[in-house]
Amino acid sequence: MDANSFFFLNRDQLSLHVLQWGRPGATPVIMLHGLRAYAQTWSSLAEALGDAYCVYALDQRGRGLSDWAEPASYCTESYVRDLEDLVANLGLERFMLVGHSLGGSNALEYARQHPGRLIGLVIEDIGPGSSSVGDGAARIRREMQETPNLFTDWTSAETFWRKSRPGLTDAGLASRLAHSMKATEQGVTWRHDQQGIAEARLSITPTDLWPAVKALDCPTLFIRGMRSDFLPGATLTAMQAANAQVRILEIADASHYVHDDQGPVFNAAVVGFLHALRPALQGDQSTKAGEPA
């Protein structure tokens, strides 16, 4: 299934890039990628969802084909505003939302600020404290400090990825090389604002996600990779105890990057969860003005 590509201007006059899959007018789903990822990371999930949904994957500011911004704006507040602007641009009233890591944090905070807007929410491998304490947070900070901005050639870039993500599948590696990197006269470099993102990640205090978790008012599935160093199992259990809307799922042989490591299992879980929510839309014409759910 091919994706359509479009751009829109946000309130800061940044041009943000969006990929769209599925049937226009079908149940809308917005997807938010992780810290250094890109919209195409969701292509497999979008294809699994099929024409029963209209999927929008955003290149968040500073990533993919979207404009870069000041490092100070690479923060939850700005990302949530960008999501608000996308929702307004699409004319959506109610929709489903999926987020991985950084995208999951942004999705949770959007949900807190906009009660009643979400039909359902899927959060991949992030929870309260993930970005500030623990082995995963330390790993991300270390990567931000040590990641080169330039590689001599594509072989060097591939070597970097294989070393930093030992369990990465061949498909995952090919996706990262194609969509997060580009060739220049100087060598191979990042499509995203690596320097600005690193500066922001090392200087901005992560958002406390407990208020958002406790405020959730729609069915929410938290998915954890059982080998994840980023979302402890104890946090998963605590979130479920804190809010009856929370469902939890752990996927075996998966790290923080569950949709990469166990794509078919991850996709089946998300499709099943979202599809179970669609009967609640019967008679609800509010997903988009003038269009059926």
Image (cartoon, rainbow, N blue to C red):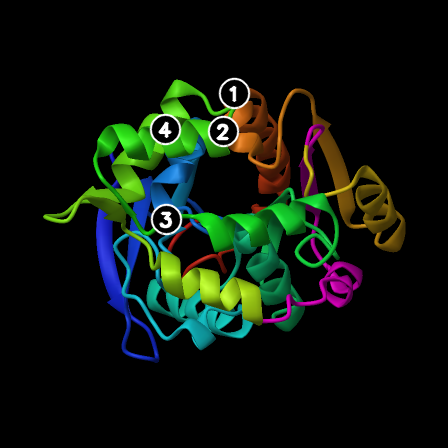
User: With 235 as the anchor, is 276 left or right in this view?
Assistant: left
Q: Badge 1, how many Cα within 10 Å: few under 14, some, many 20+?
A: few
Vertically, is 128 above or below 110? above
Q: Which of marks 3 and 1 is nearer the N terminus?
A: 3
The residue type indicated by label 4 comes to Thr
Direction left: furthest residue: 185
Label 4 sits on residue: 159
Figure quadrant of the N terminus: top left
Q: Where residue 33 is drawn, which disc sits there?
A: none
Q: What's the CA distance linking mark 4 and mark 2?
A: 18 Å
Q: Name the residue under label 3.
A: 148
Q: Where is residue 205 in the image (x, y as percent from the top left)?
A: 64, 70
Q: Earlier in the sequence, mark 4 or mark 2?
A: 4
In the image, is residue 219 part of the stretch drawn in magenta? Answer: yes
Percent coordinates x, y for residue 280 in the rendering? 63, 46
Which residue type carries mark 3?
Pro
Q: Report which residue position mark 1 lands on.
A: 264
